[in-house]
Amino acid sequence: MANQLFMDWLSSPEFRLSFSTAKNLLDSPAKFQWEITNKLMYEPDEPTESMRLGSLIHTLVLEPHEFGAKYVIQPDFGRTKPELEKKEHFFEENKGKIIIKDKEVDKAERCIRYIPDHVMDIINAGKTEYVINQPISNLPFKGIIDCYNDRVIEVKTTSESSADKLIASFFNLKYPMQAAIYGVLAKKEFGLDYYPNTTYLVIQTVAPYRAYFIEADKEYHLYGQKLLDNALAIFNYAKKEDLWDKGWDIQSIGLPAWAKKELDN
């Protein structure tokens, strides 16, 4: 059943690749298939506390006017029968909204308090949460760009204070590939003769709650394009050979560069 659901999705009008799905191809076609099938069959997992905070910050920065439509703050309820009835009515009345606590809003507002005014001016003048459906290498893709204002702007929250650890997390999470995808989509969507650059608005969720821009350079984008090319090659091969849930040949494991240096010493 699960495999049939996946195959039906591949041939359906709803079929779209995205960064969140395509990045799984770099791990294996089996992971790509599993993630898609899991979404088709089951309700999504409850978001973690950090995920909830990140989503709330996104809304407050990019679409503050949507806060009331997406979120509702849960009041404190007592344990008496009337209070429990009020609580039940509250949850029933707010089905479909994300229920949050006052302390979550306080934390999010603390995180965005130090975003410079000129940065917010750039965000407010752009197209936020902009949805693009365009093909890449003859495959349908969908992207939701946080903000477009002559460049792709992505809002990223982090608990890292170290610049080196932050950059390492970007590569671990395959953000260069996201930059490549969004660059291609924006170029096609807006009829550009160049690939727009990607800028990250990084917002710290721990003290000192700094907020700042990081500009991706040419090598970053080239690396992202390489990841995208690899992912699409894997997709096309797996689809042609029907290798979605089958194993690959045994591969050797080599030492990373830093380990080789230690070995040589």
Image: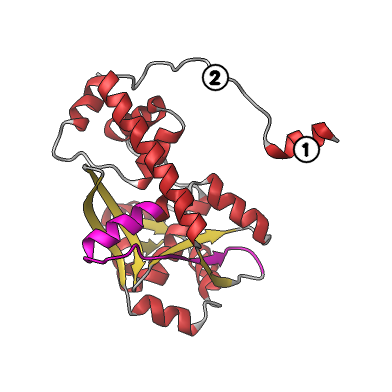
Tag 2, which secondary structure?
loop
Disc on the earlier residue, 1 or 2:
2
Q: Is residue 217 magenta?
A: no
Span colored in magenta? 180-207
Q: What percent of the width, then of the height, locates residue 89? A: 30, 55
Residue drawn at x 33%, y 80% as measured from the top left: 125
**Distance in Å between CA atoms under marks 1 and 2:** 23 Å
Q: Is residue 203 magenta?
A: yes
User: Which residue is more in the foreground, 124 or 41?
Assistant: 124
Residue that label 1 marks: 261
The C terminus sits in image quarter: top right
User: Label for residue 251?
Assistant: 2
What crowding class fits label 1: few (fewer than 14 Cα within 10 Å), some (14-19), or many (20 or more)?
few
- Disc 1 marks a residue whose amino acid type is Lys
- Disc 2 marks a residue whose amino acid type is Gln
User: Which residue is more in the foreground, 49 or 4?
Assistant: 4
